[in-house]
Every structure is written in C-alpha cells, then in structure tokens.
Image (cartoon, grey):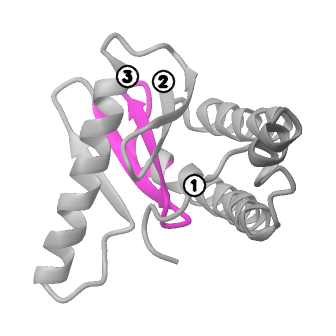
Amino acid sequence: MPVGAASWSFTEDDFGAITKSLERFLFDSNARCALLVDRSGQLVATVGEQPKFDPTAFATLTAADFSANDQLAKLIGENDFNSLFHQGEKESMYLADIARRVILVVLFDNRTTLGLVRLKMKATVDELSKFFEEVFKRGANDASKPNILAGADDEIDKLFQ
C-alpha cells in the first residue's frame, strides 16, 4: 500500500482503543507524551502531557522529517527507516512507523532511558500496526461501496421542475 495513500477515519471506539494503548505505553516506559501523526502531516492524537509547542506545526515537521529520512534510506540502499531517534540535552524523541501511514512520536526526558522506550515501543508499534491495518481495510471497503446518494441532487431537482 502506498505511503499516505487514500483517506481513512476511525470511530470513537477506535480512538478509545488507540488512547488506551498509548496510555499503557506511556505508563510502562515512563515517557512524557505520545503523538500520532499521519504521513501527510495531520495530527491524529496526543496522549500524556500536553506539549508546550504547537502540535499542528510539530505534526507537519514530523511528517517531513520521516519523509526526508525515507529518501536518505534509499540513498544508502535501504527501503526505509522504520524508526528514528533524536537526542537532545534534556529532551529526546523516538519516532516509529505504524503501518506505513502513521508515525508514532514519543517525547521523553531523563526520567527514562532510550532502551526502555525502545523495548516498550516495539509491542505498542506491533499492536497499533495491526489496529491501523484493520482501520485502513475498513476504509478501503467503505470506499468501494456504491454511494446510494450519488445522483440524489439531480433526482430532487427533477421533482421540482
């Protein structure tokens, strides 16, 4: 499936399942915040401590960062990088690909370690990848269904002529 292709959406129940998974991950890893960003740069969800920056701008930059790193991977003979790590003096972030269409960004500080974040993130990435694959399949099935309201405007106009 192409990166970022096709539109998709999820229900309130889906959002609840995503939130629970991310809350469990944050608790287990002692990370501060998890953000889900789609590959087009749209913020999907934020769980944990609210960031002290503009999350919409951050989402756009995250998608661009992941896209640039995909190109770097190709230059060295890899298909892509499925995770990225950025370390700062006080704050760090770990990014992971979810089902080739969503990026999980985890913000953490010195209350935890990269090793613990990576360890706990693997199970979360696997869980969310399976979940989003189902969401994408459901979206693809919905898109292939005939639109029963297609042409309704024309039929209504004919009634009033």
Q: Secondary structure at mark 1?
A: loop
Marks 2 and 3, Cα distance to the nearest angstrom?
14 Å
Pick the front one: 94 or 109: 94
Q: Is residue 107 magenta?
A: yes
What residue span does the magenta drawing correspond to? 92-116
Name the element at disc 2.
Answer: loop
The residue tagged 3 is 55
Nearer-N-terminus badge (2/3): 2
Task: Give the Cα separation between the discs numbered 3 and 1.
Answer: 21 Å
Q: Nearer the viewer, residue 116 or 133?
A: 133
Residue 58 lies, in percent from the top left, at 30, 29
State yes or no: discs 2 and 3 in contact (Cβ < 8 Å): no
Please tell me which of labels 3 and 1 falls first in the chain.
1
Q: Residues within 10 Å of mark 1 (few under 14, many from 20)?
A: few
Q: Report which residue position mark 1 lands on.
A: 7
Q: Which residue is mark 2?
A: 32
Where is residue 32 drawn, in percent x and y? Answer: 48, 24
Estimate how packed mark 2 is, as few (under 14), some (14 to 19) or many (20 or more) residues with alpha carbons within 10 Å. some
Look at 30% across and 42% down and name the residue there.
Answer: 62
Q: Residues within 10 Å of mark 3 (few under 14, many from 20)?
A: some
Residue 19, by quadrant, is: top right
From what the image shows, is residue 23 above or below residue 140? above
Q: Residue at x 72, y 60 (%)?
A: 139
In the rendered structure, does residue 7 fall within the stretch colored magenta? no
Q: Nearer the viewer, mark 2 or mark 3?
A: 3
**77 relative position to 58: left or right:** left
Camera-near label (1 vs 2) is: 1
**Left/right of residue 55 with respect to residue 129 in the rendered view:** left
Q: Quadrant of residue 92?
A: top left
The answer to whether residue 29 is seen in the rendering is yes
